[in-house]
Image (cartoon, helix red, strand yellow):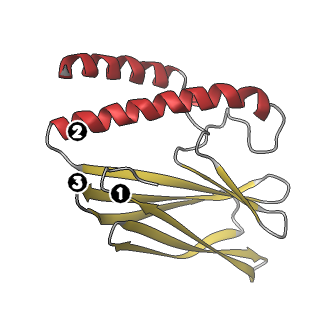
């Protein structure tokens, strides 16, 4: 049984690595700000070949992306089953945050990674970490506070926008990852 699942998993991973641009977007969330800027939050990194929200071509590729994302979700569940069969009960998950200007220019991106241990009766966050990258020199990370509390990993980013050495604004963005007793992280 384990051997069959392992073979299927290998085939699926080869398929997904051959088509990385289609393995994303089912769990994409967009948050619009008053000034027209917006956040895109995903469970997978955005590929440069994927259409951004609101750009032409999104509708045509969306159906294919959803089907492949569902397929990838099934594979993830199979992998968790294999880990459980081997006695391992830990999971690590990363959430990706992208910040765009109102004219759809990517200004900065960040990641939040949580590592969790879980059993049938409890889940606990044992590590929270972050990453940050800027694509415009006027935007800089001032601070990021990571916390592990019960079954949740949290990171709060404080990103400053400067022009000619003057701070114009600070964007605060909090992102959380929560693990349940089945090892599902949202």
User: What's the residue at 20%, 18% (across, down)?
Assistant: 3
- Of residue 137 and residue 47, the one placed in the foreground of this image is 47
Nearer the observer: mark 2 or 3; the answer is 3
Earlier sequence position, callout 2 versus callout 3: 2
On the image, the x and y values in percent for residue 141 come to: 58, 71
Nearer the observer: mark 1 or 2; the answer is 1
Image height check: is 21 above or below 135? above
On the image, the x and y values in percent for residue 21 come to: 60, 29
Image height check: is 163 above or below 36? below
**Mark 3 highlights which residue?**
120
Say which mark, if any, is on residue 83: 2
Label 3 residue SS: loop
**Mark 1 highlights which residue?**
180
Cα gap from disc 2 to disc 3, whole angstroms: 14 Å
Q: Quadrant of residue 177?
A: bottom left
Earlier sequence position, callout 3 versus callout 1: 3
User: What's the residue at 31%, 34% (across, down)?
Assistant: 79
- Tell me the quarter of the image containing the N terminus: top left
- Of residue 75 and residue 172, the one placed in the foreground of this image is 75
């Amino acid at each position: 049984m384990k051997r069959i699942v392992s073979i299927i998993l290998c085939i699926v991973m080869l398929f997904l690595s051959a088509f990385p641009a289609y393995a994303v977007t089912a769990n994409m969330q967009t948050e619009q700000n008053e000034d027209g800027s917006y956040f895109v939050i995903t469970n997978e990194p955005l590929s440069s070949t994927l259409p951004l929200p609101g750009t032409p071509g999104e509708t045509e590729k969306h159906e294919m992306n959803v089907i492949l994302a569902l397929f990838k979700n099934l594979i993830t569940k199979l992998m968790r089953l294999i880990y459980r069969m081997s006695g391992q009960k830990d999971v690590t998950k990363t959430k990706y945050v992208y910040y765009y200007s109102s004219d759809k220019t990517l200004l900065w991106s960040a990641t939040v990674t949580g590592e969790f241990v879980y059993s049938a009766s409890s889940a606990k966050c044992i590590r929270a970490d972050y990453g940050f990258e800027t694509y415009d020199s006027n935007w800089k990370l001032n601070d990021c506070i990571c916390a592990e509390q019960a079954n949740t990993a949290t990171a709060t980013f404080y990103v400053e926008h400067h022009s000619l050495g003057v701070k114009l604004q600070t964007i605060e963005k909090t992102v959380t990852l929560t693990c349940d007793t089945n090892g599902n992280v949202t």
